Amino acid sequence: QVQLVESGGGLVQAGGSLRLSCVASEHTLESYAVGWFRQAPGKEREFVAATKWSGSIIYYADSVKGRFTISRDNALNTVYLKMDSLKPEDSAVYYCAADLINYDLRNPHKYGFWGQGTQVTVSS
């Protein structure tokens, strides 16, 4: 059982930055793909970024490309999401997810393990 814990959310002004962390406890993330998703009130959960175990394959949603960076430290069992140039429309609960998948990493239904989420609020 993979347990994921997100942290690093908070309130930031537009144009600011945050770094989210997703730590896996009780289980290594070796071989797991990890994705970040977000959900704003009244909206569907949407894909943000994802990386395969090796970090050699990375995907971003068009809305965050060039502003967000996903990275992982496998030795620490941690995946990060660095968010720069934040906009009010980035406000949402951000979730990390993991699973043993090699394709369709943008699809939230492919992930079986989820964290509890961390709130990001960007003020204008």
Image (cartoon, grey):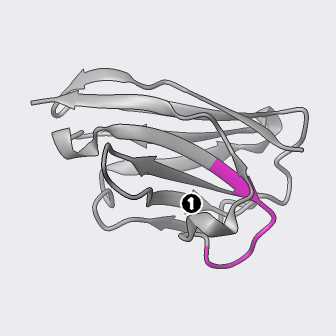
Seen at 32% across and 43% down, the residue is 41
Q: Is residue 30 magenta?
A: no
Seen at 33% across and 61% down, the residue is 65
Residue 16 rendering spot, x and y as whole percentages:
23, 29
Is residue 21 visible to the viewer in this orientation of the structure? yes
Left/right of residue 5 with respect to residue 101 in the rendered view: left
Residue 55 rendering spot, x and y as whole percentages:
66, 60
In this picture, which residue range is highlighted in magenta? 97-104
Left/right of residue 114 with respect to residue 14 in the rendered view: right
Residue 60 rendering spot, x and y as whole percentages:
43, 64
Seen at 77% across and 43% down, the residue is 74
Q: Please state, as top left, top right, bottom left or bottom right, where the C terminus lies in the image.
A: top left
Neighbourhood count class around disc 1 (C-alpha, 10 Å): few under 14, some 14–19, many 20 upward: many
Q: Is residue 3 above or below residue 12?
A: below
Dominant secondary structure (helix, strand or loop) of the stretch shown in magenta: loop
Q: Is residue 120 above or below residue 79?
A: above
Amino acid type, residue under disc 1 in the picture: Ala
Q: Is residue 101 magenta?
A: yes
Q: Please state which of residues 16 and 45 is positioned toward the viewer in this rendering.
A: 45
Residue 50 rendering spot, x and y as whole percentages:
56, 60
Seen at 33% across and 54% down, the residue is 43
Q: Please state, as top left, top right, bottom left or bottom right, where the N terminus lies in the image.
A: top right
Is residue 16 visible to the viewer in this orientation of the structure? no
Q: Is residue 7 above or below residue 69?
A: above
Direction left: furthest residue: 124
Q: Please state which of residues 115 and 61 is positioned toward the viewer in this rendering.
A: 115
